[in-house]
Structure formats: structure tokens, C-alpha cells
Image: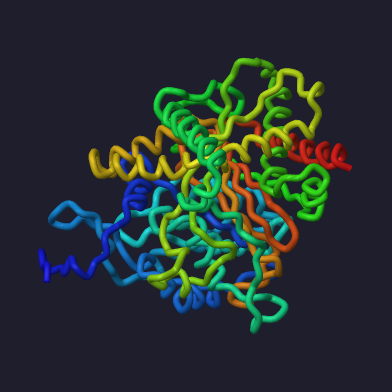
Amino acid sequence: MNFKNGFNWDEEPPVSPTGQYLNSSVLSLNIIAVLETEIPIDDWLAMETIEMLFLPINPRFSSLMVKDDKGIFRWRKVKVNLDDHVKVPTFPPNVEYYDEYVHDYLSQIASSHLPESQPLWDIHIIKYPTKTSYGCIVFRIHHSLGDGFSLMSSLFSCVQRADDPSRPLTFPPINAVEMRKNSFLNNAKRILLTGLNSVTEFGWSFWKSTLGADSITPIRSGEIGVEFRPVCISNVEFDLGDIKLIKSKIGGTINDVICGVIFYGINLYMQSCGHNANAIDVTALVLLNTRILRAYQTVQEMNKPETSAPWGNHFAFLHIPVPICKNIAEVGPLYFVTTARKIVKTKKNSLGVFITGIFLEAMTKLRGAEETSKYLHATLKNTSLLISNLAGPTEQMMIANHPIKSFHFFLAGNPQSLAVTIVSYMGKLKVVMTTERGFINSPLLVSCMKKSFQRILEAAG
């Protein structure tokens, strides 16, 4: 047994390299999920749910990240005091709708750090009505505890199906990235094409992460320390039926359609800001789930040793060039969807993600997790925006007997002026934009995204 300073290090699992990348002196990322309720919140019931359902999900929710005597970071189990983790803010009385207060509060927690002296999560119970809900339950969880898939699976294990709690929630199929070499050995031509694409993709990705910073534009300030600045959180909601209609008309996937909507919306926004330059670099960093699966798994399934979807951080990123047109009227709205489809198809026919993963592992072994974290920070900083998406339930869910009218998530701590997160729920697709306050005109960007979707829908019809 390996005892040191009263602790048995053999019983304290090491923090994964990715967990260390995401919680370092240069990079600290949080995932924030917001659940909007249909009824006023009973915070006693919410506390009971946290204690009975949330905490037992995974030991990391009751653990600190500590360094042992050999300099290895490990998860140390500690006793959790819920009063340290559950916050119930107080706003001024006699206000009809508290949208502005809730917005400012979310911006505040997005810009602040979780204390390292306790497990890296907290929950905020906002018992004030807005124009869309009676209250909000906000989960803020550090990315080092797990990726979006792990943390959303945790969240879904705490909720029930509103129409029939005895039945499980159902989810749309998941398009995961399969990082298996054997799947490319069936066709010689495909192997050659994949090899060429892989070398090109990895080389371009490496260049973007080191020397190839994007141009300064209305969506990228390029300022140092942008991750510490106040943010605005806004969203726009689309009907999944309309998105499927566009998809059926022009082919591709739902992700292709939504990427096209985002790309067109960015062009409209930049045009509205008077930015009409041609020779500019605008790149989206798209986060991908790298598990080999086609549906959400329960937390119990994720914790099995033989699972193909283990708990933790299993994601990769793709650099996607955003098409920027000086005269967008000449190309038409559907150009951005078809272009997005072609780019993503080429990226999929590549092992660039796989090679990047090997490269990051090698960098960690040779130079340490801190240097790898610096590389990831530069990867984010040099791009114009981040895009991440998750699939939510198709039925309405409820938590502690509180029906959830809507929910969304966003990232905090990324060194970019713009991040776009997408989640589906009950036949709707919510697109959330986290923007650098004072630099990006958030209402204008929302308006451009709505205009983008409507024009693409009309053109597809």
C-alpha cells in the first residue's frame, strides 16, 4: 500500500490527462446548464434531489483534484457540504419579470471561478419569474469532471419523464465520431484519400493552433484575456420540423443545416457591422463526441468497465473554415448549407482527429499537461468561434416534480469572443450564443441568426 501524509494514494484514482488540460493555470472551462421551470421552485425539493440523486452519480462530484508526493494529480474523496455548493440568489422585490437580473446573474457566474478548495461544481436555484419561466435551476460543472456527454447523462439521471415517470426518456440518434482504423481498410482508394485528407487536416489544425490566428473581425476581438471579460448569453429557437424540411430538400444532416444557418448568420452580422473584406480568415472550432455509440447511455452503463461510452472527457475538435462572402446576395442562402455539408464531409473522411489525439498524448508525456493546456488554449484563442451541440430528450422532463419548460447549456472560460452551443428538446432546437460583452452586439447577432434561418427555410421551400 502506498501511504503518504496519512493518505492512501492507491485508492485515489489519477486525474486523466484531459482533466488536467481543462483545469490548469492557463485554461479553466465550465459547462453551465440552465433548466427553466413551468412552476414556482420549491428549493427544499431541489435540495433533496441533489443530495439523493446528483451526488451519488459519480465520485468526482465528491472529490478534490490534489497532487500526490510524486506530482501526480488524483481525485480525493471528501465530505460535501451542500450549503457550500447550492446558491439561492436574492433579487430586488416588486419586479414583474426578472429577465435582466437572471441574465446578469448568469453572466456573473460564467465569469467567475469555482473554488479549488471544494468539489468543482455548484447549483444555483433562481426563484424569480421571467417572461418564459417561473424560475431556473442552474448547474455549473467544471469540464475536468467530464465532457458534455457525461455531464448531460448525469443531469438526465436526475430527471423523470413528465408525462409518465415510470417510462424512460428517449433521445434522438447520436452521430459520434468513430476513431477506428479498421473501418478504413476496406477500399484502397478510400485509404489513399483518407491518408491525404488526414495529413492535410492535421497540418492545418496544427498551424491554426500555433501560428495561424484568425483575422480580427466583428466576431473576434483577438484581445488577450477575453475569457475573463463579462459575457452576454442570448438564444434563438428553431423548430426541428423546419430543420428536417430543409435537410430533406438539400440533403446532408441536421448538423449540416444548423452549421449553414450559423455561417450565413455570421455573414449577415458582419455585413450589418460594415465589414466587407474578402481576404479574411474565420474559423469555427467544432467539438466532437468521440465515443463509439448511437444513443445516450445511463450513468450506470457508463461506469461499467467494458462500456464503449465511459465516463470522462472523450471529445476532439475540428477546425472548420467559415465561408465569408463579400456580396452574400450573389450566392444565396442555401450556398452556406451546401458549403458546410461539403466541408464537414471532407473532414469526416479524415483521421485528423485521431492523429491530433495521439499528438496531444505525446506532448503530455514529453512536456507535461501544463504545456498541452497552453496548446489547447492557443487552439481556442486563434479561432473565431466555438460550436458544440448535444441531443436532449424528445419528451418533456421534470426534476423534483418541477416540469422543465426549456433548457440549454453554454460554456464559460473559453478565450473566444463567440461560442455557440446547440441542444434539442421537445421538438425544438435552441441555439445559445455566448458573446464578449461590449464587443459583439448580441441583439443584432440574434436578429441575424433568425433572419438566416428564415431565408434558408424559404429558399429550401
Q: Position of residue 25 (x, y in %)?
A: 31, 41
Q: Position of residue 289 (x, y in %)?
A: 51, 53
Q: In this rendering, does residue 171 appear at all?
A: yes
Q: Locate residue 379 relative to residue 159 in the image: left or right.
A: left
Relative height, residue 240 to residue 231 (above, below): below
Q: Residue furthest bottom?
A: 166
Tally of numbered discs:
0
Q: Residue furthest front?
A: 188
Indicate the quadrant containing the N terminus: top left, top right, bottom left or bottom right: bottom left
Where on the picture, by quarter, is residue 296?
bottom right
Residue at (51, 47) in percent of width and height: 184
Residue at (48, 50) in percent of width and height: 109
Q: Locate residue 351 relative to residue 296 in the image: left or right.
A: left
Relative height, residue 420 to residue 308 (above, below): above
Q: Position of residue 393 (x, y in %)?
A: 66, 65
Residue at (70, 64) in percent of width and height: 405
Residue at (30, 57) in percent of width and height: 15
Q: Locate residue 441 relative to residue 80 in the image: left or right.
A: right
Where on the picture, by quarter, is residue 438?
top right
